[in-house]
Amino acid sequence: MALAYDQQTVQARASGVDSLTQTTGQAVDAGDLLVVCTSISNATGGAITVTDDATQTYTLAISSSATDAAGGRVRVHYFPNSVAATVKVTVNPPGASADIDFTLSEVSGAATASPLDAQVRSAGTSNAPNVVSGTLAQANEIIFAVMTHDGATAALTPDATYTQIGENENNSTGQCYNAQYKIVAATTSDTADWSKATSVNWETVLASFKEAAAGETPERTKLGVGTKLYRPSLPHLIGAGVLAGVLGNPRMTRRALLGLEGRGPRDP
């Protein structure tokens, strides 16, 4: 299955809160990859947690700080091989009065085990924030890139080769940020760019996720976590029909149901 960006939830935003929750707009398909791009400010020291009501805990792919506990402002978290459900995701930074922005994305066709590839952070002062992926592990991957900056609100233009999935350019309602994604078909290094009207101090992160290998199928199904679909063979179906027809007959013994009536104990 080829990589596809299936859905993005409505962007979640709140200021001065302990945590922030958002629910997917539609049910997530079993085995899909969930990606959360966050921008957080005014949180006390310590790593943030991202969980959902399907008891799935998301893994940090990259933070704009080399040590997440040091307070990186933008991050990418992910959970592969999701259960099939309409999930409610909660982003919970340390402290009780943080400014939080995040978007939740669903990706189909991603590897269900160890999907993460590139993990890059960058920072600078200019009107052209950017982050470079480096050579990718395989040809087909989806890239998520997130940027934040300080200073007053100013016009921002995202990369024309990417698709924007989240933006806040109002510093009075949270930490300014922009999130975007792109599906690439080559291992060539890729650069995510932004353009600002004025020079700013900025931080960026990039995470890429691999397409599933040929023949790889999700370990989950819509029947629930870990459930496998049962596909009966033709003999099983025929046997089931015969059994259904004789269960009400009191003359049918166990040996008759098994097809052994009239055979000796040594008969094959």
Image (cartoon, rainbow, N blue to C red):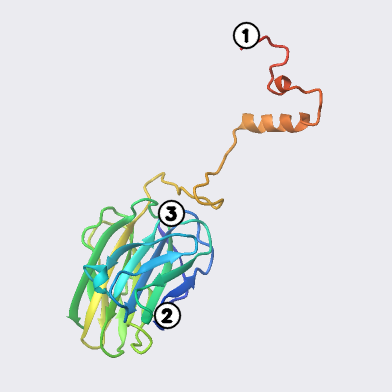
Marks 3 and 2: in contact by CB < 8 Å? Answer: no
Q: Give 183 or 220, whichever is nearer the viewer.
A: 220
- Residue at 47%, 60% in the rendered image: 55
Q: Is residue 46 above or below residue 107?
A: below
Q: Is residue 268 above or below residue 153?
A: above
Marks 1 and 3: in contact by CB < 8 Å? Answer: no
Instruction: Residue 178: give x, y in percent of width and height.
Output: 33, 77
Question: In the rendered image, which residue does mark 3 sit on?
Answer: 81
- Total numbered badges shown on the rendered structure: 3
Q: CA distance from mark 3 to mark 1?
A: 50 Å
Question: In the rendered image, which residue does mark 2 sit on?
Answer: 13
Label 3 sits on a secondary structure element that is loop
Which three-letter amino acid code belongs to the residue tagged 2?
Arg
Label 1 sits on a secondary structure element that is loop
Which three-letter amino acid code belongs to the residue tagged 1?
Arg
Pick whichever of labels 2 and 3 is earlier in the sequence: 2
Which three-letter amino acid code belongs to the residue tagged 3?
Asn
Instruction: Residue 239: give x, y in percent of width and height.
Output: 67, 29
Question: In the rendered image, which residue does mark 1 sit on?
Answer: 266
Residue most extreme to the left? 125
Instruction: Residue 105: give x, y in percent of width and height.
Output: 42, 66
Location of residue 156 (image quadrant): bottom left
Location of residue 176 (image quadrant): bottom left
Q: Give 93 or 262, whichever is nearer the viewer.
A: 93
